[in-house]
Amino acid sequence: MELQQKLAILADAAKYDASCASSGANRRDSSNGKGVGSTGGAGICHSYAPDGRCISLLKVLLTNRCLYDCHYCINRRSSNVRRAAFTAEEVVKLTLDFYKRNYIEGLFLSSGIIRSADYTMERVVEVARTLREVHDFRGYIHLKTIPEASPELIEQAAKYADRISINLELPTQQSLDRLAPEKNFVRTKQAMGRIRVKLEDAADRRKTGDKKLRHATGQSTQVIVGADASTDADFLNRSEELYASYRMSRVYYSAFSPITEPSSILPLSAPPLIREHRLYQADWLMRFYGFQTSEIVNEKHPNLDLRLDPKLAWALRQRHEFPIDLHTATRDQLLRVPGLGVRNVDRIIRIRRHTRIRLEDLARLRVSLPKVRPFIITADHRPRLEELDIDRFYARLPIQHEQLELFPHALR
Amino acid sequence: MNSSNYFPMRCVDPGTHFDSWKVVARGLLAERVRPEEVVWEPGESLFANEPVVKTVAPISVPADLVDLAKAVTCHQDSSRWALLYRIFWRVILGGERKLLEISSDRDVAKARVMQKSVRREIHKMHAFVRFRKVGEDETGRERFVAWFEPDHFIVEAGTPFFRKRFANMDWSIFTPKGCAHWFGGQLKFSEGIPVDPTHHPDELEAVWKTYYRSIFNPARLKVGAMRAEMPKRYWKNLPEADLIESLVRDSQNRVGEMLEIEPRPVRAERKNAYLGNLKERSIVPHCAGPGGDSSIEEIARLLPGCRQCPLWKSATQAVPGEGPMDARVMIVGEQPGDREDLEGRPFVGPAGKLLDQALAEAGIDRGSAYLTNAVKHFKWEARGKHRLHHKPAAGEIDACKPWLLAELSKIAPEILVILGNTAARSLLGPGIQVSKQRGIFAAPHLAKKVILTVHPSFLLRVSGEERKKEEYRLFVSDLELAMT
């Protein structure tokens, strides 16, 4: 099969993985080397596809042949999709060719499971090893690992990669049993735990002398939203656990998307894309805004309101805590004001040391005034209490989720 | 009296860079020239042939102001020179040293917006420059060229990135606002040129377009999100952008076709040793506790299936005891901590390290002792990205007790060391206070010699160096009781 045909198949097979980050790697460049590449600091999105997702890495599978039968996946063994396999050399050459033209930050390599977890993992690691050791490639490498692979192989993967990941895919063992029968929750957690230990040990070694140590700096995972009956609370509680237990750099939420090889036990309708977006917003609130999961979702309200962003929804539930005075509020309180982001909160704290804050100041910080007005007191503004009435918000806010719906009509 | 009679307008040339502007601005500041008295005319100085200002000593300026100025001077807006001078004047002569902290100030806000667009465009340059290969020299060193059209004067600021990343290739980046060349390890800049001088097709562009087409998911069209990050003005120099229109147009049909496909039935798994083995490993039989006479291996095998309390749900794994079967000393702690939970072994975290040290000082070889915990799963609560240890509740201690007793009966140690209140609660019953009853404890039904002492994690929490030392000494002397 011609290389371009393989690329078409194996990129198509990899596109359901939402992970795209190329940030957070240890800083290095090629000025003292033979090869090409640099990493460090923020990642770069070299292009964007019309699905709004960034293209930062050459994201491909080594092969889309697979022993497993995960029903949401186009590559499962029951699918009739066309199969292909790259050789290690082909992936290496593609990566270098794309990289030298500045198309990409590096490689994201995953694979269907062939023969066994170890057999597959060895092949994935071999690509990374060749890039690093033969070609002195210093760009970004993200390797997908398999929880069932031997710890030694995962350790090797971490040695060559900047980030490694294992996809949890579904938040409970029950869902895995139904939709991904070969996957096992406990094994996945154990592998994530081992990876965290390796990452932290490596970070310690870098700190205490071995400054040049090349090692992955983070792990991430992905869950599929809307393929099973899991609630947003199920997802967010699981994320909270994954962040705390395994120090995930990211948990990616990927709205289940129809594929050309549907399985007979897939759900009948795809979730609205806005649900994925709301989960990311909630995830952000937990990681950067000091929210507990239980403040965002609970047993009584296990799902996020699709019409309001979760911070606004929280603020309206807690309206007795508002309005707050921008001059006296603590940083934690400011972070909870709908419409104020981390950066503007820090700016406000600096500004108020020198001057009284007025609405026009906020406008110059590019804060959305209609959004914050009901919640704040400034030198020239005090909201009326009825502005915090939830129905007014529903009435005023454009209902966007219909436009973002994956499909206007149900599937089938 | 009209002040302009005394302070005639000055017309000065800022040059093209921060460094040239800086020299001029420094001179004006030294003469305390007010911002409203200066007209900045690039390349049009009325005093072209004479030095506009005297050379004066540098003025100390806050570092973040220099950063701001460096970025703003790259902006295309011709008002940038005057804006910067106004800000410098206010900071240095106007008594507003902290001006930059007031991000909502009119001047600061405007400068920050400029800084942001300059930074953004540098970032977009790093993202959207597309090299085309034009050949190799006799040593195999490859040569590439690119054409890029920035709004701002960012070529010099944006180039170090390429020099570091592509140090071992030769390349030129041509733009209307300046060109950068890296050739044989030398970096040179040259004047901008108005039109794209590169006409070298690169066969890799077709491969790249295949990739772009294939990585796009037609079932989730979000053109707005794409355009927000990849504005249309960059498209003409991105080979893949040719595809956008047709990809968007065809997406609805492609999704429609997907929806018409008959769902595939599940295909039975082929006979495969690996999958068979996997299935076997996945089955963890739930169990109510250890069997009457389970061996240590059986205990470790059955433990993961224990559902007698809910702690298994948020833990990574159950942590069984560890040590030789014929151990003379058995040590019982509280529960696995963060690190123990990840590694599946007892006493490998910070408290374990401290225990190791104390054991060594007391003359006890850790390797010949059996170490375990009263509760086998880690109980914790999330605090941001961390797990806070939580004391197990009485019900959880009791639920785990059969496992501990099974271990105790199999090891049958001569000496039993009980660390902390949880282990004491489990083995000696409620109401025991370690702080009051530490030392040798009579419990012949458990072991010939029973020693009750604090948990090493307590020593980690003690505040004050003196007290810490004292508590550690007491801990070691408790452990020494085992050997006497």
Image (cartoon, coloured by chain):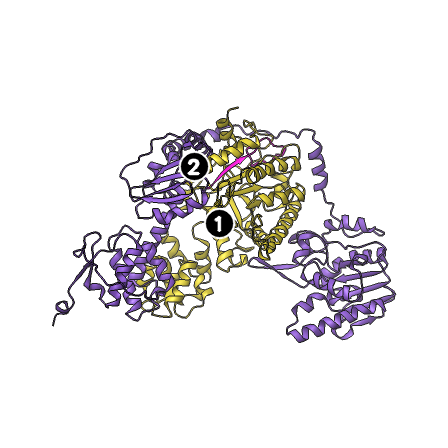
Chain colours: A yellow, B purple
Q: Which element carries disc 1, helix, strand or loop?
A: loop
Query: Mark 1 packing: few (<14 Cα in 10 Å), some, or many (20+)?
Result: some
x and y, in percent, of residue B450 in the image: 83, 67
Picture layout, residue A326 above or below residue B400: below
Q: Nearer the viewer, residue A216 or B6?
A: B6
Label for residue B94? none
Q: Percent from the top left, x then y, of residue A357? A: 34, 67
| Residue B156 seen by the camera | yes
Which residue is the site of mark 1?
A40
Q: Residue at x 51, y 33 (%)?
A: A93
* Residue at numbered disc 2: A101
Residue B266 covered by magenta stretch: no
Q: Residue at x 80, y 49 (%)?
A: B297
Query: Is B20 on the left-hand or right-hand side of A347?
Result: left
Task: Tell me the subunit letter for badge 1.
Answer: A
Amino acid tagged 1: Gly
Mark 2 secondary-structure assignment? loop
Question: Which comes before the other along the chain, label 2 or label 1?
Answer: 1
Residues B314 and A154: in front is: A154
Q: Amino acid at mark 2?
A: Arg
Badge 2 density bin: few <14, some 14–19, many ≥20, Cα 10 Å: many
Where are the magenta residues, as a range? Answer: A56-74
Quick check: is A67 in the magenta stretch?
yes
Q: Is residue B115 above or below residue A274?
A: below
- Place of residue B140 in the rendered image (x, y in percent of width and height, measured from the top left): 47, 33
Could you tell me which chain the residue with mark 2 belongs to? A
Q: Are marks 2 and 1 in contact (CB under 8 Å)?
A: no
Q: Total number of numbered labels?
A: 2
| Residue A168 visible in the snapshot | no
